[in-house]
Image (cartoon, rainbow, N blue to C red):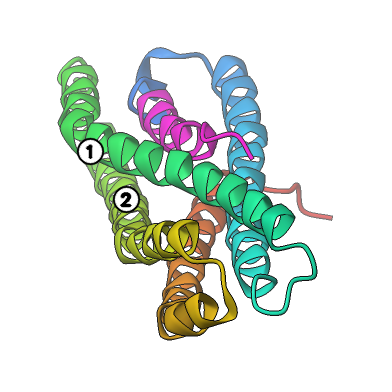
Amino acid sequence: MSHATFKHGIGLVLSFALVVAAGCKSDHDNRAEVMTESISSMQSARQGLVDANKEVDDTLAAMNALPGASDMNAAMTTFKDKVKETEDTAANAKEKAADMRARGREYVNQWEDNMSQVTDPAMRQNMTARQEAVRANFSSIRSAMRDAADAYTPYMAHLKDIETALALDMTPAGIKTVQPTMAKATAEGATLKEKINAVIAKMDSVTNAMAPAQPAK
């Protein structure tokens, strides 16, 4: 899986915030078109996170195939490839989570600048309420993505420990030595998947809120 997964997901959240922040300057048809595109892109980002979950499963499967492997060299090659993919995803997740924290205020400022041009008090009040809702959605996804990025740290550390130890000793005794660490990596992988699923749930909530109202029948 490409390590652009998290980049795409966070970029979508930032783009969504900017689209809504600029809403008061756009005509209705244009806003509807942009919102539809945003929903489609958010769904694509969601699939990327589903792929990240599968990457955890695939990496753990490669790890668990090591004990008793008939061709230890081939099994180690597969495991090392999966660890490298996970390492790339983890690094990108941390980078983009930090970027999201740094740039979040930029989008709030954009909204506030646009609102300053609205003179109708009732409209300003409604837009302020919308701003708070978007800010809350943005913050919840940002927090969930940070948690997912952080969850990679212990998981990645134990995967690398296993890789290093077995590179030095691929004997049955060496496999036995790393099995407690494998158990830790399995538990941390489950935690990581929970964190990624939390991001998916937040994205689903935002996507549902973005969906245009259906006409009454």
Residue 206 seen in the current view: yes
Q: Which of marks 1 and 2 precedes in the sequence?
A: 1
User: Does residue 61 appear left or right of residue 204 in this picture?
Assistant: right
Q: The N terminus is located in which quarter?
A: top right
Q: The C terminus is located in which quarter?
A: bottom right
Please tell me which residue is depicted at 43% across the width and 82% down the height of the picture.
177
User: Which amino acid type is shown beneath numbered disc 2?
Assistant: Ala
Q: Does the magenta stretch include residue 14?
A: yes
Residue 67 in picture, x, y percent from top left: 65, 78
Kindly report which numbered mark, 2 or 1, lies closer to the viewer in this rendering: 1
SS state under label 1:
helix
Determine the residue located farthest toward the right in the rendered image. Answer: 217
Q: In this view, does 214 lie above or below 59?
A: above
**Disc 2 target residue:** 133
Please tell me which residue is depicted at 62% across the width and 43% down the height of the picture.
48
Residue 183 seen in the current view: no
**Disc 1 target residue:** 98
Q: Residues within 10 Å of mark 1 (few under 14, many from 20)?
A: some
In-front residue for pair 4/36: 4
